[in-house]
Amino acid sequence: MLLLVYSTPMNWNELLQPLRYGDKEPRKHDASSARSIFEQDYDRIIFSTPFRRLQDKTQVIPLPEKDFVHNRLTHSIEVSSVGRTLGKIAGRSLLESNPALQQKLSFHDLGAIVAAACLAHDIGNPPFGHSGEAAIGAYFLEGNGKQFKSFLSPAEWEDLTRFEGNANGFKIISNPYHKGNGGLRLTYPTLAAFTKYPKESLPVYDKPLASQKKFGFFQSEKTLYEDVALNLGIPSLGQNGFAEYQRHPFVYLVEAADDICYQIIDFEDGLSLGWIDFKYAEELLIPIAGDAFYVNSYKQLSSREERAGYLRAVAINNLVKEMAASFMQHEQGLLSGTFNRSLISGSKFKPQLDEVKKLSLEKIYKARQVIEIEAAGFEIIAGLLDYFAEAVLAAKVKGNTGMKQRKLLELLPAEVTNAEASIYQMLLNVCAYVAGLTDKHAITLFRRLKGIELPG
């Protein structure tokens, strides 16, 4: 599909407005405040319950036995650190070329927007890594969830059958109704920077652009993103009544931070576990490090873990500089919509990064230990959905819940079992509840509902 380009590009004054849901006008800059509104976003995320749960969610290697392997929490913190640096470097250049912004924002604020969006980028992901998303979708496509199709619109059905962690993350961080209970009420620039795929689940494109490969909000949050886009001056690209928007330029910095971290640090995990021969670390990471690599400093390190850590650090440092420069080089294309690919795809180190990805795929992502637990995750997630979705069906459609269904409904949060909610909303909330479980909680709950294990 061709990308629609508007004659009037987006502009930074609108894109960076300090607005939260419900605000009548942008917040005024308060130089005396200890924290800017964007720094508050970061703090709201890091102290939230959904973020805390990432400490027991799979990054790549499920249920790791060694403590130096990354989970979703450590990955998110590292991505946020890289994103903050990217945002600050690019932010300083943006402020220099846009003097009017200097009266309202500092480059620290721009770093904080990217850092907050990076911190939350995996907050909606289910247990057991990306296979958790696939397991939820498969339940509705192939499992007992097929019976619900007739009750849903095509777009609602697509939300469930292609359940998307990005959209679930937006559901979590945009919820304005339950502040203190999952609703964070973040600023619009942070919400837009978070939304990597600013479209609803339909249509599905045969040859998608970078912003069209997945979707970024469910039907239940579509009007919320429409409000974000309207207030920030983000153009609509939707056709035939479907919601689709141009990306906020900061999405590219968030995406670059994630790309840098997962490619380099997943690779480092493979080295640490001994799944990837250490010779590849030097062969691939030293060229990426470039001038930041100091051979004398490297030779003084005695262990492989220290050397791997050094190579990771200098490689990331060089990639951050390159991605920030690339962002500024493509600034006008980002604002007009003519640029729609990842920043890292244009890296001069693409041959090395492609080899890193290839090795990680072969040695880590397809390792037997990983696949076994991912397969078990399918069984666990499908089992949990079966219990809770059947209880919703009994309550919402059949109107006659048995004792077992009533007990299952009592285990769910109140918003899931709200009698006024549609069957779509209830099913989506069941999926969001299961997606919110940690790996170990999902396993324990499944075993208890099966009667294999009892509390105590």
Image (tube, grey):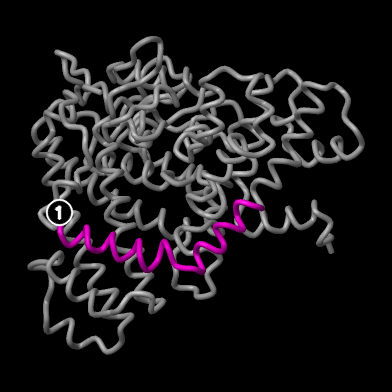
- Which residue ends up furthest to the right in the rendered image? 403
**92 left or right, relative to 206:** left
Q: Which residue is mark 1?
A: 321
**16 left or right, relative to 397:** left
**Is residue 255 inside the magenta stretch?**
no
**Is residue 370 inside the magenta stretch?**
yes
**336 left or right, relative to 203:** left
- Which of the two residues, 77 or 146, is positioned nearer the viewer here? 146
Check the image and report above or below for 162 versus 241: below
The quadrant in which the C terminus is found is bottom right
Residue 444 falls in image quadrant: bottom right
The quadrant in which the N terminus is found is top left
Residue at image coords 60%, 55%: 377
Q: Give the overall secondary structure of the magenta segment.
A: helix
Give residue 228's position: percent from left, percent from top.
39, 22
Check the image and report above or below for 320 versus 310: above
